Image (cartoon, grey):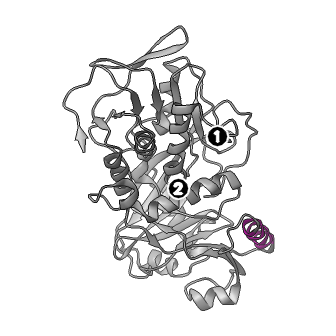
Amino acid sequence: MNRLEAQPASAELVVIGGGVVGAATAFHASRAGLRPLIVEARPQLCTLTTPVAAGAYRLQFEELEELELVRESVELFGHFADVTGQRQYDPHVRERGYLWLATSEETAMRQRALVERLHTWGQTDVEVVDGDAVRDRWNWVSPEVRQARWRAADGFLDTKELTFGLAEGSGAGVLLGHPVTGFDVRGGRLRGVITPTGTISTDAAVIATGPLSRPLAALAGVDLPLITVRRQKLILPEVPEVPADGPMTIDEETGAHWRPAYDRGAWLLHTDPATEPSEPTMDVPTDHRFAFRLMDPASPVSVARVVPFWREVWERGSRHWMLQAGQYTVTPDHRPLIGATEVEGLYVNTGYSGHGIMLSPAGGRLLAEAVTSGGSAANAFAPGRTMAATPQPTL
């Protein structure tokens, strides 16, 4: 990777942020003929939000525009070495499937309606599976589960390898340990990006800093419609009960979900719509109560509600666990902001609302198109669009 020892005086395109969104932006910008520079505030790429993600992707989306982006991203995942032109980093894609479990008829009806809609969009490999058939395939599922939706080709990947591979494939210069502290904006146009070392002269820059995007954009006088919401991940390095080849398993009523990780472990997550927004920060605190809410069978969102072996894990009590925390960057309509701001030459690629791993590898292409050709007038993710508030997705 082209790590720079000193800040350059100028750059054709400055990509601010070294997570997966910034790396994808730099990669597609390079393919579009630009020479990007990645500027990251921390001493290494991919150390804030991206590594806290669930590390998974799915083609079971409620909105067609987002589904189409994920399809494009999945195509990139499946041909990663050939597309990126590098062999050093491998995202280790594994098709393990996404299994959404329903215990109520109301949820089962919503599942059937979504699968039917997905079929009309050409995603015909998503199935509805009735309760007995679910238990025939996955004998650890609770008798209370009456139905599931399932796609076998959904899966997992390594988010850090993905990010580093995209950055390597971009050929971008990488400037680490350089926080952006301001912008040189004159006459409504971007002239430079300011760090503690000085100003990088440029006519184009992209804010791709996840939860820090709104305060950073404000330095240029741009108000982004974003909030930040804490998202935690419970890590159990060794849990013998967890099937190593198991799928992402989601309790669709509660949003609690888990997936196998490492050789004998698991990651457990929960997106609680009641979580209050928090101030964007590089030091997101964890809350020990999160582990108990997911693990204790007495909790209404316990993973044991639909998968009984988690009760055994809890009762044994001797499995080590640890917590990580990051922040979702959320827009009112839960779609990303990809495109130009009102400051000429300043762009944003942010606000993925929890879907950055899946959407941003393709979202980087949309951003590169906005920089090189003004983008498409039909861009459903343009920052200036009208946004109607929608409920927080469960996952």
In the image, what residue type sits under mark 2? Answer: Met
Query: In this picture, which residue range is highlighted in magenta?
Result: 106-119
Image location (x, y in percent) of residue 314: 46, 74
User: Residue beneath label 2, please?
Assistant: 358
Image location (x, y in percent) of residue 325: 44, 49
Which SS class for mark 2? helix
In the image, what residue type sits under mark 1? Answer: Phe
- Cα gap from disc 2 to disc 1, whole angstroms: 15 Å
Residue drawn at x 57%, y 40% is: 351
Image location (x, y in percent) of residue 233: 46, 57
Which SS class for mark 1? loop
Tell me the chief SS of the magenta region: helix
Above or below, 4 against 284 in this view is above
Above or below, 38 against 192 in this view is below
User: Residue beneath label 1, please?
Assistant: 381
Image quarter where the N terminus lies is top left
Would residue 276 appear left or right of 172 to someone viewing this image?
right
